[in-house]
Amino acid sequence: MKNFINLKDISTTDLRKILNDAKKRKEKRKKLSTLEFDKDQPLKGKLLIQMYEKPSSRTRLSFHIAINQLGANSITVKASELHLGKGDESIADTAKILSTYGDGFLLRTDSDKKIEDFSKSLKIPIINLLSPSSHPCQVLSDIFTVEEIKKKPISKLNICWIGDCNNVLNSLIAASVKFKFNLNIACPKNYRPPNFVMEWVKKNKGKINIFNDPKKAAKNADVVFSDKVFSLNDKGNKAKKIKDFKNYRVNSKLMKFTRPNSIFLHCLPRGNEVSEEVFLGKHSRVWQQALNRVHVQKSIMLYSFGKLG
């Protein structure tokens, strides 16, 4: 049993095993329809319990498909329907109940502490579907997409992030250290990654550069990432934040600073941080990116159950 909570806590060897397994599984599904099982049905008989405390489209749908293709079943419970530390039942007791009924717990939460508390009491693996500081399933799938399109290891590519320093970027930073790729980040001065994140990067010899000028960050980039400026975890002044990021919009003018065959990725949902011409244009691979969530998340679950080949 292995948890999948933060990329920084998982070895590069295991992350690479997940990606390799996903590649093989995607290849084997070329002639199968969405509802057909993988031939080996490696999780047949398993029950995965999913809980979403925050809105979800791609994560919810992709995991539902992934679980079914592996031969398992899933049930989705609403956070409002469980005690979750409220009333007379502690999170530890809820975790024991989940461990009794299910084989794995998949949590999308508004609290890093909550996912940590669950991990201490669960007797089944927990997978982080999104938390305020991390979105590991999204980013590992993005690494898969980049390598699939570019047909080379991400360590040989220049990666660029334009926008806010949020949970997706935190996981991308962790990935840059694990997979040893160059990462340029463009954001306003007051929105830079926190010191403890950069100290971890420095300690682990990461290759990260931070720019106030998005054009400098995008120069010679092979891949450009972006995300909503005002995301699910934000509780501040929306109008002010959007104003602060007005010069960090990914448009055709900015993409001209990247390499000719560069690609644009976005975890969705999108906002004004990317122009329509880029999002729907020749650089964009967002739909392939979304589809690959299914394949990689299957291999993440197999990793957690100790069933990777």
Image: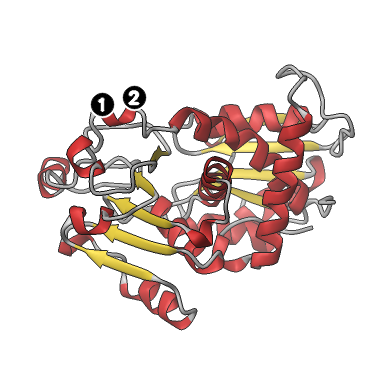
Q: In this orientation, does residue 46 appear?
A: yes
Q: Quadrant of residue 63?
A: top right
- Whether residue 185 sits left or right of residue 307 in the image: it is left
Q: Is residue 244 above or below residue 275?
A: below
Residue, x 25% and y 25% (percent of image)? Answer: 276
Q: Position of residue 282 (x, y in %)?
A: 36, 29
Residue, x 29% and y 48% (percent of image)? Answer: 258
Q: Amino acid at mark 2?
A: Leu
Q: Position of residue 43 (x, y in %)?
A: 84, 38
Residue beneath disc 1: 277
Q: Position of residue 34 (x, y in %)?
A: 70, 19
Determine crowd level at label 1: few under 14, some 14-19, many 20+ residues with C-alpha closer than 10 A. Answer: few
Q: Amino acid at mark 1?
A: Glu
Q: Give the SS element for disc 1.
A: helix
Residue beneath disc 2: 280
Residue, x 20% and y 48% (percent of image)? Answer: 236
Q: Is residue 11 above or below residue 235?
A: below
Q: Are marks 2 and 1 in contact (CB under 8 Å)?
A: yes
User: Which quadrant of the figure contains the N terminus?
Assistant: bottom right
